[in-house]
Amino acid sequence: MLGPAAITTALADLGAEVIKVEPPSGDYVRRMTWPIVEGVSLMHLHVNRGKRSIAIDLKTADGIAVFEALVATSDVVVEAMRPGGLARRGLGYERLKEINPRIVFCTISGYGATGPYRDLASHGIAYDAWAGIFEPEIDDAGFPSIPNHVSIGINAGPLFGGLGILAGVIQARAMGVGAQMEVAQSDAAAAFDWYREETYRAYERPETEVTGNASDNYARREPAIAGMRGGVRYQVYRSADGHVLFMASEQHFWKKFCAALDRTELFERWPGSEYGDHARGNRELQAQLTEIFAAQTTDEWVQFGIDVDVPIAPCHTPKTVANDPQFRDRLEWFPTTALGAEQLPFPVKIVDADPLVPTMAPTVGEHTDAVLADVLGYDAIRIAELRAAGAVT
């Protein structure tokens, strides 16, 4: 499943040994979604890189024994089923902590282990819809449809889960006691969008207690991007060859911008407030800035921002951002020869250390023999017995 795999991808990228326990038929993520790269999904190649795979049949007594032996040597178990899936097999947290009192047990699921939606089937975009991340758009035929957006729940959930796991491991190593934790990807989507949700809650209080920004006459604007509609000094402008985002909402940035262009009359006429002033609705100024930004390329405006100390960003798409010099400097693609498809690295750099290059995502049971031998110390005879019994493949 995607959520548990993504949690442990980050840990594997940071150097943890991650053993992917699969049924003999394999994880369906190998065939899930698109693109399919030489018969294998990019999803699998990315979220399962750097891991080893052992194929165990948990419907057999010997398979359960192998799983329990792995638990005894591990720091963490991540449940890749709906909450309670392992417990129904007699392998819930209570049983696992009998085997290993320091075990950190984490379940990640769509809507979590509690609440009226706990048994509601779902896919990744469900959590964004539930959390209000996007609003439906109307297509050309007049039907509502899913808008293009970054999926938050399926990305934020694993990140929050990874942080929780690391905190649990630190506690276990310090105190000798593990922990049981569960993560809902819907919770994660809502928590990631905290600013908008908390703003609406704040606005439920009277205007004598909660107002907008002083630079905007204290108007109680909608939060985040919605509150920036109509902005002028914080807005997208067309450059000579693309678009840039201009962000001179602080007065000192606006003053630098005008002075560097020898357009001090713009500042003198519209100096604005010290902070958070978007010159909302000032169409006359917007027309002037439109003409100014159209005169240079995006690269020239970015360099201008660096030289003058004014925040100006290039506007990219997911397809074009990889050509940006900042991207090329910071994010070196893992090559197809290493991982089966070009992939981005984990975006945390350990200073003065060479980056870890993960191994390719494993085939089903690719490391069964190695895990049984290296981790559990089983000899060839015992491994052969388990395979003959159908406990492992």
Image: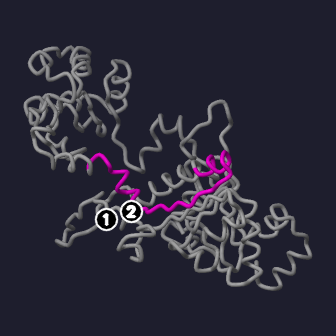
Q: Main secondary structure of the magenta part?
A: helix
The residue where tag 1 is placed is: 130
- The amino acid marked with disc number 2 is Ser
Residue 330 located left or right of residue 309: right
Position of the N terminus by quadrant? bottom right
Q: Residue at x 41, y 46 (%)?
A: 320
Q: Write down the quadrant of residue 391 in the picture.
A: bottom right
Q: Which residues are magenta?
A: 168-196
Residue 384 located left or right of residue 65: right
Q: Is residue 392 above or below residue 332?
A: below
- The percent position of residue 332, horizontal first and vertical second, equals 57, 42
Q: In what element is the residue under mark 1?
A: helix
Q: Residue 186 got which mark?
A: 2
Q: In what element is the residue under mark 2?
A: helix
Q: Write down the quadrant of residue 225 in the picture.
A: top left
Of 251 and 327, which appears nearest the observer? 251
Q: Is residue 188 above or below residue 331?
A: below
Mark 2 and mark 1 residues within 8 Å of each other at the beta carbon: yes
